[in-house]
Amino acid sequence: MPHAMPRFLANPWLLAVSVCLLASPAFGQPAESGSPRTSLGVRQQRVEHMLLEMELKFKSLAQTLQESEPERADKLVGALQESKKLLLADRMANITAMLNEARLDSATTEQKKILSDLRSLIRLLLEDDQKNPLQEWEQLQVWRGQLEDIQNEQKATRRESDKRLHPDSALRDLDAQIAAVEALLEKQQKLNTLTETARQAGPQQLTPLTPQQDALRQQTDDVAAQIAAAGANREGAPPVVMPAPSTDPPAASDPPEPGQTEPPQPEPGQPATGPSESGQQALQNASQHQQSAAAGLQQGQGAIAGDGQKKATEELERALAELRGERGRIAMLPPQSLPELAEQQAETADKTARLKDEMQQRGAGGSSPGGGSMPPGGKKPPGQKHVEQAQQAMEKAASDLRSDQGEQAADEQEQALRELEKAIAEIEKRLAQLREETQVERLARLEQRFREMLARQQAATAKTAEMEKLLLEAGSLKRSDRLLIVGLAKEERALAESAFQAYDILIEDGASVVFPSIVNALRVDLEQTAALLDGLKTDDYTQAVQEEIETTLAELISALEKAQRQKKSDQESSSGGGEQQQPPLLPNSAELKLLMSAQMRINRLTRALEKVRGDAPLDEASRLTAESIAARQEEVANLTERILQRIQPPTP
């Protein structure tokens, strides 16, 4: 497999234009009135001759490339034609004459115009990067996110249309949902009372209540699923079978750690599942709190169980209030209220139209605001046709709503949703193809990011050690030193933000197990270091955390270097074949090595904390640090199990 040439060498016309830029007397500074006119004229004439010679060579090269690389040849021909239209050679000759005649002001003005035109030519030639798979991958990700937002808006409008078109059906559903939540709330309140009584009797009396709490959690999940299904059915999709509330204990699952009462957030990078109905999110929150309460009951920890039950009760009450409020709103809707939705539908259509126009522009070879673009050649980007059809259906739906034609509007809204689903599916298919193509470049970008972070962290670590030395020598710090430490805290937070951006990239990859967790732990360490520096702590523990950050970054860089070599080797030896499962960004061996390093870091941080603590009891900050280390230890154990499952072949 031939090695790719550097972009400047692979594009001689780009090289020529760039040389003209650098050689021009206008580059860097205008001509000075005190300069000898013959010297300036000679220099300008050299640039003029250089351009003419390169144009001649360029024509020959374009003809040669026409066979092997026709798209690149067409790009070069287009640049040459643009150069002719701009009359660059003639204008350079005029500038030479101006310089020889000492008309320096006029020459400088013309030189600036020439520079602007040369830069435009460079931008034109750099559009060859439109075929860069990574740029296409990034652009498709943006469009997918926009489509998911539009899809959720359209679903919400379709559901509201159905409620207004069939208010009696909506009220019946709400009455059933209210009754179900009232029953859940009553059961939870009774269980809360039993838990309080058991706490008074002793921890051993709490464990027998665990099955009741687990069963109630399952029933809460069932009611939340019923509400979600009712909303989905109002989108015009095939009817969703709503499960009856279960009274059996749920299947065993991994409970949260005692004290983890906050509902977990959705994983970054996961697509939205659609708009929530009234009470749905509150019920999901209640279920998470019930799970935490069950874990507390199982372990005989009454305070944790009570806290989870209290929060679950509050969420059930919130769900009930939302459902009752929604029922009151539907009951108060005036007859023929559909036209009120026309503006909402039109806004979604306008948003879809803007996305359609953007996709058309990129498909025609235009550049996106962020620099990304789609491959040239007039081919429509994936999903564009369906976005166009969705937008047309939305416009018709808005018109039908204005005319109070509810059934016709519903048909158009459902058609819009089907087209949006098809558009997202096409983009997902193309993204799956691009993921492997872009892996080497994404690895290189991550490596560059981590190298920059490492250099900045090393500087911050050195400054922290310097401040600690000053403190030990002088016994106190000057105001300027304290401000410097606060500045170090800001730098650590900036690095944490960079780590979070890298984490997002890894989550999008989807196939990696250990890598995202290591980067997320890196972010946590950076934020912890920032907090320590905010408190003007520059002691051994702060420096130990900073050194661990440097070690982590160095290990990530090493892993990325090896992964790039492996990916390139795999691509060169690959002979194609059938469709294969998407490989992770890092191979299993690299992830296992990172996992081992993570365990060693946990060991070192534990020793460092113990050294700083000495024989004294843990203060609040140290206690939180210890809890963070314990949580990280548990995460390493979970990651080990997950990666072993991925490595082990499936049982026949």
Image (cartoon, rainbow, N blue to C red):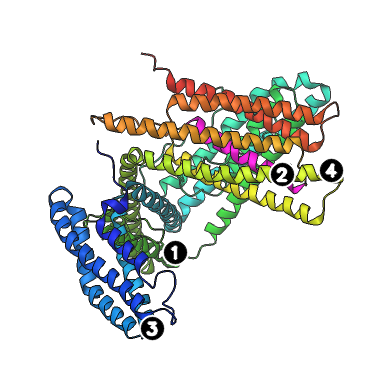
Q: Kindly identify the amino acid type of the residue bearing the numbered disc 1.
A: Gln
* Mark drawn on residue 344: 1
Between disc 4 and disc 1, whose residue precedes? Answer: 1
Q: Residue at x 42, y 32 (%)?
A: 563
Residue underneath mark 3: 104
Rendering coords of residue 54 (x, y %): 22, 62
Marks 1 and 3: which is nearer the front?
3
* Mark drawn on residue 473: 4
- Answer few, some or many: residues within 10 Å of disc 2's Cα (few below 14, many 20 plus, some between 14 and 19): many
- Relative to 60, residue 558 above or below: above
Magenta stretch, residue numbers: 513-535
Q: Kindly identify the amino acid type of the residue bearing the numbered disc 2.
A: Thr
Residue underneath mark 2: 464
The image quarter in which residue 202 lies: top right
- Relative to 446, residue 389 above or below: below
Magenta stretch holds residue 367 = no
Does residue 249 appear anywhere in the picture?
A: no
Magenta stretch holds residue 518 = yes
Q: Residue at x 30, y 64 (%)?
A: 17
Between disc 1 and disc 3, whose residue precedes? Answer: 3
- Residue furthest to the top in view is 652
- Answer few, some or many: residues within 10 Å of disc 1's Cα (few below 14, many 20 plus, some between 14 and 19): some
